[in-house]
Image: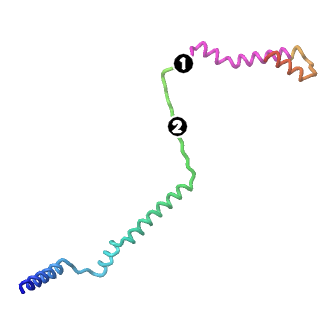
Amino acid sequence: MKIRRIIMSVAALAIVASAYGQERLSLEECRSMAVSNNKALEQARISSGMAHYDRAIARANYFPNISASGTYMYNTLNVSLIDSDKSAALRNAGSTIQGGIDSKIKNFRAQLRGVSDVKYFLFRLQNIYA
């Protein structure tokens, strides 16, 4: 009997304690709790946000990509691998050589005015200046 009494008193105490911890909610409060705790709705919100970002990425890829870059370097040190005399000689070497070849061709044409055989003329030029 004593055990039965202890069990009954513990059960009564548990019922009273559980009733004290609960509060009454209205229908709107129940709905808002259900919506806020629903995992499927949260996943739908996330997938909607992902679709928005995917759309923004697709729009960005629609336009052409344009990029530009530039560099500028200023160096006060005058670096030269050869001295100024050799540099001046090399700077004028191309025009000097071209002028020499042009004058030789003009002299050869002056000597052989009225050449009727062009192939022979070109053959002579090749043998003389090659």
**Measured from the top left, where is residue 69 in percent x and y?**
52, 40
Provide the secondary structure element on which disc 1 rests.
loop
Identify which residue, 63 or 49, lies in the foreground.
Answer: 49
Between disc 2 and disc 1, whose residue precedes? 2
Write the residue at 56% across / 54% down.
63
The relative height of residue 60 versus residue 29 in the rendered view (above or below) is: above
Q: CA distance from mark 2 to mark 1?
A: 25 Å
How packed mark 1 is, by other alpha carbons closer than 10 Å (few <14, some 14-19, many 20 or more), is few
Provide the secondary structure element on which disc 2 rests.
loop
The relative height of residue 51 versus residue 24 in the rendered view (above or below) is: above
Q: Is residue 19 left or right of residue 85?
A: left
**Measured from the top left, where is residue 57 in percent x and y?**
50, 57
Q: Is residue 66 left or right of residue 43?
A: right
- The total number of labels drawn is 2
Q: Which residue is mark 2?
A: 70
Question: Looking at numbered disc 1 in the image, what kind of residue is underneath it?
Answer: Ser
User: Quarter of the image containing the C terminus?
Assistant: top right
Q: Quadrant of residue 38?
A: bottom left
Write the residue at 38% across / 69% down.
42
**Measured from the top left, where is residue 35 in percent x and y?**
35, 74
Extent of the magenta region: 80-108
Q: Which residue is mark 1?
A: 80
Question: Looking at numbered disc 2 in the image, what kind of residue is underneath it?
Answer: Gly
The relative height of residue 101 versus residue 54 in the rendered view (above or below) is: above
User: Quarter of the image containing the N terminus?
Assistant: bottom left
**Measured from the top left, where is residue 95 in percent x and y?**
70, 19
Identify which residue, 21 or 79, lies in the foreground.
Answer: 21
